[in-house]
Image: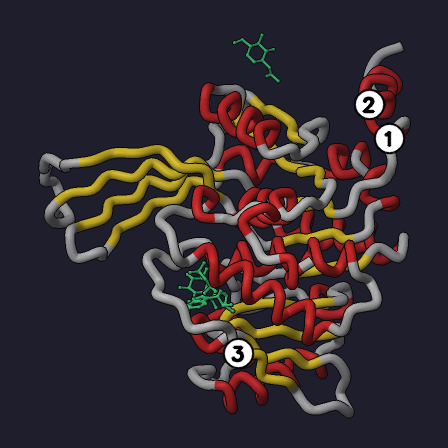
Amino acid sequence: MHGPLNRNHLMFIPVMTEEAFDVIVVGSCMTDLVSQSARLPKEGETIHGHNFFIGFGGKGANQCIQAARLGAKTAMVAKVGNDSFGDSYTQNFKDNGVYTGFVGRTSEAATGVASIIVNDAGENAIVIVAGANMKLNKEELQDALPVISSAKVLICQLEISPQMSLRALRMAQENKVTTIFNPAPAIPDLDPDFYRLSDVFCCNESEAELLTGSSVNNVEEARCATRELLRRGCGAVIITLGAQGCVVLEAPESTSKHVPTSPVSAVDTTGAGDSFIGALAYYVAHYPAMRLEEVARRAGQVAAVSVQSMGTQSSYPHKRDLGAELF
Ligand SMILES: Nc1ncnc2c1ncn2[C@@H]1O[C@H](COP(=O)(O)OP(=O)(O)OP(=O)(O)O)[C@@H](O)[C@H]1O
Ligand SMILES: *[C@@H]1O[C@H](CO)[C@@H](O)[C@H](O)[C@H]1NC(C)=O
Ligand SMILES: *[C@@H]1O[C@H](CO)[C@@H](O)[C@H](O)[C@H]1NC(C)=O
């Protein structure tokens, strides 16, 4: 009566009785500890700052929360520490309507944190300690198999162990769940299986550059990079280009489409990429027949709203904040 049997017993009851999830994210949670000071400290120096705040971040969690705010039924598969940051993060998911039955806790590492110092010129110095994110393991993924296999869309990034991301993508593909993979932060020698396991492979310019080895600074170069990434086995490729929107390529024989975004006055673009991906997952789940170009256009509109206010998750719009033409 111990071990797996107990675990299954506890895990399955709350979820099996409900309908399937739209979007599952297997990924990271990070607490941002942000200090603002006139300048960045030098080595060995202590200086006084003028403001401090705690924010919720981590690419996986950000994407999950954006999808949830648009109305997707979401679950997060992740690991936090057995500490107060872990408690707050779990509550943050609940406050946003994200199912937390697969957000595990560990005493072996602290909840992931990003210690950020921002100076008055907007420059920053950041130390990230992934901590508990790296402790998410294959047994926990296996526990989540019933919900992963019945979901509409699964999203993964690279802020947890790459082996766990690969495993989650495989589980999804074997069960015909649409996969969205965001290779962020990019690593130079990405396992080639990541391309074959991605129905939609979505990254920004610098990630595309690192993965292809060619510069990606404009729409033309992004078009070339989408062709190269698609050739590696992805179902479709999207490269986001900040204020220039994105480039989408769906099939090797088709031409890539440049999808511009609305001109807006950007206040803080932090987390725009995650807003885009969370929105992408929502639209793929809710409108499975919609062309990827249109899905990307709408996701770009959502992300463009997020850049118009400060913060990461705090800038992500809810469905009620957006025009009816996006739904
Ligand atoms: N200045 C902007 N004006 C309008 N839309 C923007 C702007 N910046 C970003 N966006 C929207 O957000 C999407 C993603 O932005 P971007 O390509 O900068 O991602 P990213 O580099 O991963 O973001 P970040 O690292 O800042 O979170 C863009 O495709 C676009 O739709
Ligand atoms: C978390 O810590 C509490 C004590 O503070 C302990 O009782 C509990 O077993 C721990 N849980 C895990 C998962 O380590
Ligand atoms: C792309 O995303 C990474 C995070 O994965 C970020 O560090 C980088 O600045 C982004 N690049 C651009 C051009 O926005």
Describe residue 58's horizontal placement relative to residue 69 as left or right: left
Quadrant of the image containing the N terminus: top right
Give amino acid for label 3.
Answer: Pro
Residue topped by disc 1: 18
Amino acid carrying mark 1 in the image: Glu
Which amino acid does the dot numbered 2 rest on?
Answer: Pro
Q: Which residue is tagged 3?
A: 260
Residue with the mark numbered 2? 14
Q: Is residue 256 left or right of residue 58?
A: right
Q: Please identify the quadrant where the C terminus is shown.
A: bottom right
Q: Dot 3 lies on which element? A: loop
Q: Is residue 318 above or below residue 191?
A: above
- Cα distance, mark 1 to mark 2? 7 Å
Contact, mark 1 vs mark 2 (Cβ under 8 Å): yes
Percent of width and height locating residue 31: 43, 35
- Identify the secondary structure beneath mark 2: helix
